[in-house]
Amino acid sequence: MARTNINPIVPILFSAYFSVSTAYTAGQILKFDTKDFDTTNSYNTTTGQFTAPFTGYYLIQVTGRYTAGSGSGLDIFKNNATYARADEINGSTANAAGGIPIFLNKNDVLDLRSGNSTTWGGLISGQRTSTFSVTRLPTSFVE
């Protein structure tokens, strides 16, 4: 018997990146200034916040390159409370990447915050070095 999806999804919601290197203080929301796409208009480049358009499971993916400071981390916040640390990195220049699944109710808010005062990288030779994306995951099928 064929499987029928009873919970249709919008598979990819948004992907954004820094177009220029930007300095942030510890705890400050990272505001990715350029969107590759945003299928549900859920990411605000002014506030740096993603608002869930649907209740369900999501996959958060981040990459980061810091170019100054004494180490940093990418902290994931859900509804203004720490949810997880995506990565802890130390040294004068480093790259980081991480991903985590998360359950969100409609209108829950996600953002990324800098673990320490540092400069997060923008484009290097046209390549994205710091990115933030969210994908909605399928949740329900019936036989």
Image: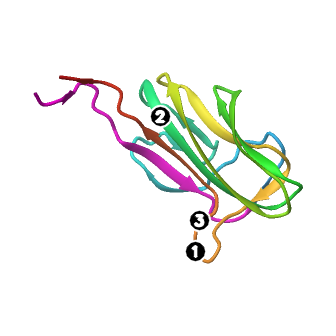
Task: State the image coordinates of residue 55 (x, y, percent, origin top left).
Answer: 43, 24
Q: Quadrant of residue 127?
A: bottom right
- Secondary-structure class at tag 2: strand
Taking the spot 66% from the left edge, 49% from the top edge, the residue there is 31
Q: Quadrant of the N terminus?
A: top left
For the magenta stretch, what is the residue range? 1-21
The amino acid type found where label 3 is placed reads: Arg
Q: Quadrant of the C terminus?
A: top left
In the picture of the structure, the residue carrying the numbered disc 1 is 126
Do the residues bearing badges 1 and 2 touch, measured as CB atoms within 8 Å?
no
The amino acid type found where label 1 is placed reads: Gly
In the picture of the structure, the residue carrying the numbered disc 3 is 128
Give the camera-side residue of 96 and 80.
96
Q: Residues within 10 Å of mark 3 (few under 14, many from 20)?
A: some
In the picture of the structure, the residue carrying the numbered disc 2 is 58
The amino acid type found where label 2 is placed reads: Tyr
Give the camera-side residue of 45 and 109.
109
Q: Residue furthest right?
A: 70
